[in-house]
Amino acid sequence: MSQLADREQSQPEPLKIPVHIGIIMDGNGRWARARRLPRQAGHRAGTENLRRIIEACADLGVRILTVYAFSTENWGRPESEVQGLLNILEHVIDRELADLHAQGVQLRHIGVLEALSDNLQNKVRGAIELTQSNQRLVLNIAWNYGGRQEIVEAVRRIVSTGISPDEITEATIDRFLFTAGLPDPDLIIRTSGEMRVSNFMIWQGAYSEYYVTPTFWPSFNRAELEKAIAVFSQRERRFGLAPDQT
Ligand code: FPP
């Protein structure tokens, strides 16, 4: 074997960077409990970590990051925790928006905003409008989001347009989801070790690659993100086809 061929053989495969990563940011409560801190301290540490992961994703060339921040089921948590999470959302918009905008982050939201106060709805809408032309990274925040609720909403809106049943295709459903216009996530990461989808992007994740790490979300750092991407790079994505067809 020539030296060049030898060298080429020993070169590691370049990483495949996912276009769209979804993250189920789990484990804030357990991170806090392990440090004898209140749960809200875990959510605050999780929010700080999100800043680091946004920067790492943008730096690595990920185009879209969807984070599961508040599910439709999270309303059932103690009122003080729900209020604490709403305060975090407001705090992020008040204190971090200018920085995110300067970094070229485009903010989007999936879920039902109408459940929030008028003031918070206006802030979220203002943030989306301000950043709508940014191109470095789309940060899609799932807030008051549930995959089943998203599909119910889509069906309602499809029916109300009067489309005939035989005209409805998968592409029709895609167009009526909160994520309309965005590609499906290539990689969905769940922190804290739970092997559950928890109602996150259940339509869009049909062919996503899943990666679960035992690390709690506040400790999920850039090295862990790179490891998840390296594992993703090694996966053979066949989308239901036979090996020789892909
Ligand atoms: C799950 O951990 C985490 C949440 C329900 C909240 C995640 C929210 C953030 C990190 C804030 C992000 C903020 C914005 C504005 C995007 P858990 O509380 O269920 O943890 P546990 O399972 O260990 O109790």
Image (cartoon, grey):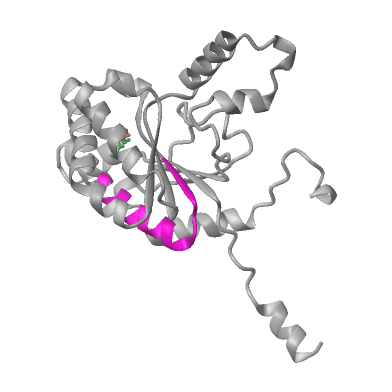
Quadrant location, the N terminus: bottom right
Residue 126 found in image quarter = top left
Q: Residue at x 49, y 52 (%)?
A: 63
Look at the picture and state if 158 lies above or below 71: above
Q: Which quarter is ligand 1 in?
A: top left
Q: Nearer the viewer, residue 201 or 182?
A: 182
Characterize the magenta stretch by its predominant secondary structure.
helix
Count of all numbered marks drawn on residues in the image: 0
Q: Position of residue 119 (x, y in %)?
A: 19, 26
As drawn, is 3 to the left or to the right of 99? right
Look at the picture and state if 36 lies above or below 151: below
Residue 23 found in image quarter = top left
Q: Residue at x 69, y 47 (%)?
A: 237
Q: Residue at x 22, y 22 (%)?
A: 118
Q: Magenta stretch containing residue 178, yes or no?
A: no
As drawn, is 19 to the left or to the right of 79? right
As drawn, is 6 to the left or to the right of 30? right
Can residue 224 be seen in the rendering of this structure? no
Q: Residue at x 20, y 28 (%)?
A: 81
Q: Position of residue 198 (x, y in %)?
A: 45, 28
Q: Position of residue 3 (x, y in %)?
A: 74, 91
The residue segment tinted magenta is 47-66
Q: Magenta stretch containing residue 49, yes or no?
A: yes
Q: Position of residue 99 (x, y in %)?
A: 25, 54
